[in-house]
Image (cartoon, rainbow, N blue to C red):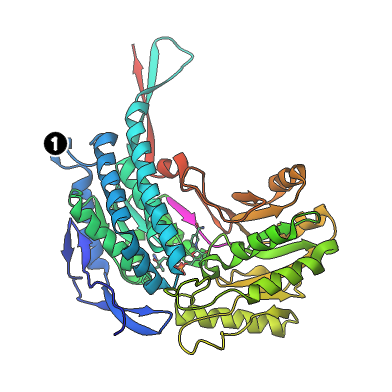
Amino acid sequence: MAASVPSRMLYIDGQWKEPVKRKRLPVINPATEEIIGDIPAATAEDVELAVAAARRAFTRDKGAGWARASGAFRAKYLRAIASKVKDRKTELAKLEALDCGKPLEEAAWDIDDVAGCFEYYADLGEALDRQQRAPVSLPMENFKCHILKEPIGVVGLITPWNYPLLMASWKVAPALAAGCTAILKPSELSSVTCLELAEICMEVGLPPGVLNILTGLGAEAGAPMSSHPHVGKIAFTGSSMTGRTIMTAAAQLVKPVSLELGGKSPIIVFQGVDIEKAAEWTMFGCFWTNGQICSATSRLLVQESIAMEFLEKLVGWTKSIKVSDPLQDGCRLGPVVSKGQYEKIMKFISTAKSEGATILCGGDRPQHLEKGYFVEPTIIGNVNTSMQIWKEEVFGPVLCVKTFSTEDEAIELANDSDYGLAGAVLSKDLEQCDRVSQYLHAGIMWINCSQPTFCQAPWGGNKRSGFGRELGEWGLNNYLNVKQVTTYT
Ligand code: NAD
């Protein structure tokens, strides 16, 4: 019998609610192409109900709302959520593997990170209590000034499908810790674990309306949030194209947005590195999460003097990556999330070929898998900087390669992108790593590694990769307004 996912409704005002239009969307297992359940599809009417609930929860009459509660009070709920997430780790990881094709082991690590994120922001939210009324020194003695940090209000949180619950937690945890109330709109392609988060919120007794979870299509459930006058901010993670649409809608109301968008990040490998370690990080940096990572280091720049040896190792190892159903033991690469994404990736590969690039390995669907949206891990050489594969985000297991001779050339090639999310530099010369890190146009730099992410450190990009930072104290500040209070004495 085919696996299935729990059947849920929308989470509004602390309760399960049928979508007003009673619409549902299928959940498709990308490894088998089978329908394994469905999710509710919210529309503008449901957004209205969720906004009203979030507004009531934000400041209940007489100042007893979530916004006015202490950081310590709010932190209790965040810690309780973290604890329930940990208790349900195995089940949540399996649901993510079924819903978006992520290898089970990787999904389990993500769930650990989800719990860690809620715990981290519980601590930061609690610390907010001690930071209120910080004095500002003024040049005139008869004036006194202090600072209040206040939650923005009702916030809209719109997330993508590649890390379903983790991307949600990066927004929900700091928003709630800051005292905002929120409406989460996960991707229609992977909403299952976000609906489980709703159940967890009910179990821990989160006050009604503090968090509302609306699944559904971007145009039907996301767009009404961006243009809603009572949603005070949109925090968005997704494609640059949708980011632009959201920013345009928000601009009509001068609504702040933070945008975590796509990338085409470089990884630079200099001569003298440990070839095996560098090949491992290169594979990890591009094929992790089936290559569907915004920060994937998907443009490899390798120094000419070691290119042949390095590529021989990299291509050999890439061919041995186990591609299978994500629930199978030892799976290293599962299917991409959807038929649409599969077709898009295959088109990128065929365009690269027609533009004159060479497929060094992969480039097709794996022969041993008849069903599912599987793409072989693919490495493409003979690439030049005018090719689509060099310029555009593939969001799949596809690495393109170019060689360079000098450090200056490597930096120039690395910065030859409209995006500016991340970058990696692998060299045994740490001064070189430091220098290159300073010159690269990126919000995140990795030295002698690729992709490690910690909720304490800021996350986000420059250029077409967006603006604003998530995680760390920057993540909390995303949801706070700063107010100065000045007194004449
Ligand atoms: P997407 O832009 O298609 O969708 C993201 C979310 O926006 C979904 O919830 C979708 O329903 C919603 N949406 C779509 N149209 C909308 C509209 N008009 N108004 C409001 N909401 C709308 O992105 P995706 O395909 O889900 O995710 C892949 C993209 O996300 C990639 O480009 C990837 O690089 C990016 N991403 C970035 C980061 C980061 O931290 N920078 C992290 C993960 C993914």
Above/below status of 363 relative to 295: below
Please name the residue shown 36% across and 51% down the image. 115
> Which residue sits furthest left?
61
Ligand 1, seen in the image, is in the quarter at bottom left
Left or right: 327 as drawn, with respect to 87:
right
Percent position (x, y) of residue 328?
44, 75
Please name the residue shown 72% across and 57% down the image. 268
Of residues 417 and 93, which is closer to you in this image?
93
Percent position (x, y) of residue 428?
76, 48
Q: Is residue 153 magenta?
A: no
- The residue that disc 1 covers is 62
Please name the residue shown 45% across and 39% down the image. 473
Magenta segment boundaries in residue numbering? 257-263
Of residues 257 and 282, which is closer to you in this image?
282
Percent position (x, y) of residue 362?
64, 80
Q: Is residue 262 magenta?
A: yes
